[in-house]
């Protein structure tokens, strides 16, 4: 196909800069959605629409309507740039420094968004139709729990063959990430006046022992061959009393697990083992929202697509051919909107040009040569998948 790759990259970089120059903190994505929709229209997408929650979508039609769509998903929102003086360039400038575009959202997720959009535009420019429909889906509220993605998948009214998340994978193919489970672990004692502690039972000592034991016991948690080891760390600690001269009746700690090959039942058993014969109360699946901690054997992960999946192998071959190098299989450390698609049995992979280490940091950037490589990988995928 005849395509001016340099012009494509230039336009893609320019679009990334304009995206960064349009701040879109969570719940304030509307101006960015308008900008993206106008761009899709300008690029002659066959269909462009913004849904009722503010997700922006664009479709280019394939030649075979019997095939499920290839969906390219990114999100519109980003996290706060924080203290401005820490940035070497203004965070909403999208300044190019050496071979990098720097600014809030450059890596997560405006650079990858631009690559997805311009890979689709590349086919239109070259006058080529893909086999199947290709749909761009830019969703709201990813950074706060995924309301946009949940709305998109709940209202899906066309068949989907594969979802490609643009989350930073350094142009490798990410096949999943660990899930989150949180648990309040509560130790009960007997509250007394702090002047006569021997008359009561102070549960803070049991908690302290538990945390010390946890540091060694955590290596017993199992690992998944691709998603990596399960981790656990204590976050919030609370007691029942606000009075400094009273020993607490109870003390509790929130444990945050990132897990790939543990179940709720195995985590319960792990905590009981670490606590020894201390009486314990275990509750809540997420510490901030009171919900009972489940008791089941289902593996807790965010999403996981096995490397042997035929769709993975086809996508990997095409992306590799486009990039001119093998696309390695990897995983995400952080969580993504992909987890919301699992209950709907969609097949999910991650493929994006930026680096995970650049997400949510000061002087966040995306490397322009990686964008070029990713455009090549995406175009081959879109054309032939
Ligand atoms: Zn992201």
Image (cartoon, rainbow, N blue to C red):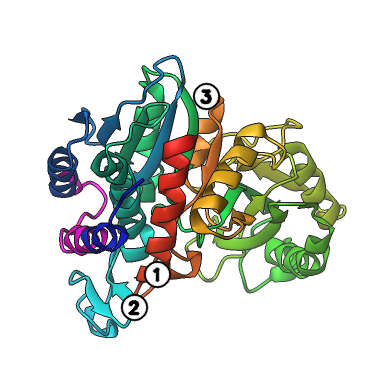
Q: Is residue 257 above or below residue 306?
A: below
Which mark is on residue 153?
none
Q: Report the front residue among 135 and 129.
A: 129
Q: Position of residue 128 (x, y in %)?
A: 32, 35
Does 88 appear in magenta?
no
Ligand 1 located in image quadrant: bottom left
Can residue 376 be spotted in the picture?
Answer: yes
Residue at 63% in and 47% down: 183
- Sequence-earlier tag: 3 or 2: 2
Badge 3 is on which residue? Answer: 344
Query: Helix, strand, or loop for circle 3?
Result: helix
Which badge, 1 or 2, is on the more N-terminal residue?
2
Relative side of 173 to 197, left or right: left
Residue 129, relative to residue 323: is it above or below?
A: above
Residue at 82%, 53% (x, y): give it: 278
Q: In the rendering, at what x and y percent does residue 265 appear?
A: 77, 37
- Tag 2, which secondary structure? loop
Are circles 1 and 2 on residues that touch, CB within 8 Å?
Answer: yes
Going from N to C along the chain, the mark reached first, 3 or 1, is 3
Q: What's drawn in magenta, residue-wise?
A: 12-30
Q: Position of residue 159 (x, y in %)?
A: 44, 19
**Residue matched to label 2:** 99
- Which image quadrant is residue 367 in? bottom left
Mark 3 residue CB less than 8 A from any atom of ligand 1: no
Who is closer to the viewer here, 104 or 285?
A: 104
Q: Residues within 10 Å of mark 2 (few under 14, many from 20)?
A: few
Image quadrant occupied by the N terminus: top left
Residue 26: say if magenta. yes
Q: Mark 1 to mark 2: distance in Å?
A: 7 Å
The residue to which callout 1 is attached is 369
């Amino acid at each position: 196909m005849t395509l001016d790759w340099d012009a494509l990259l230039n336009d893609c970089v320019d679009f990334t800069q304009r995206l960064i120059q349009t701040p879109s903190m969570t719940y304030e994505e509307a101006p960015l959605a308008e900008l993206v929709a106008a761009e899709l229209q300008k690029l002659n997408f066959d269909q462009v629409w913004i849904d009722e929650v503010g997700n922006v979508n664009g479709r280019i039609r394939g030649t075979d309507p019997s095939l499920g769509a290839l969906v390219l998903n990114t999100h519109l929102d980003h996290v706060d740039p924080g203290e401005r003086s820490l940035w070497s360039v203004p965070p909403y400038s999208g300044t190019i420094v050496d071979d990098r575009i720097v600014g809030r959202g450059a890596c997560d997720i405006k650079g990858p968004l631009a690559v997805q959009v311009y890979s689709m535009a590349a086919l239109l420019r070259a006058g080529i139709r893909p086999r199947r429909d290709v749909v761009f889906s830019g969703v709201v509220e990813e950074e706060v729990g995924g309301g946009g993605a949940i709305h998109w998948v709940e209202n899906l009214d066309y068949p989907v063959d594969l979802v490609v998340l643009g989350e930073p994978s350094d142009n490798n193919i990410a096949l999943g990430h660990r899930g989150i489970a949180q648990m309040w672990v509560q130790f009960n004692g007997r509250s007394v006046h702090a002047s006569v502690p021997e008359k009561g039972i102070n549960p803070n000592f049991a908690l302290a022992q538990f945390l010390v034991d946890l540091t060694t016991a955590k290596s017993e948690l199992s690992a998944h061959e691709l998603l990596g080891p399960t981790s656990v760390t204590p976050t919030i600690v609370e007691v029942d009393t606000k009075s400094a001269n009273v020993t607490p009746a109870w003390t509790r700690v929130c444990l945050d697990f990132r897990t790939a090959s543990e179940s709720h039942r195995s985590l319960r058993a792990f905590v009981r083992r670490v606590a020894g014969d201390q009486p314990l109360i275990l509750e809540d699946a997420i510490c901030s929202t009171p919900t009972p901690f489940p008791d089941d054997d289902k593996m807790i992960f965010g999403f996981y697509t096995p490397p042997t999946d035929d769709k993975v192998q086809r996508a990997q071959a095409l992306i590799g051919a486009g990039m001119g190098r093998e696309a390695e299989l990897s995983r995400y450390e952080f969580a993504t909107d992909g987890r919301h698609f699992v209950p709907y049995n969609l097949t999910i992979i991650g493929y994006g040009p930026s680096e995970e280490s650049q997400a949510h940091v000061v002087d966040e950037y995306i490397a322009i040569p990686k964008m070029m490589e990713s455009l090549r990988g995406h175009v081959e995928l879109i054309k032939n998948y």
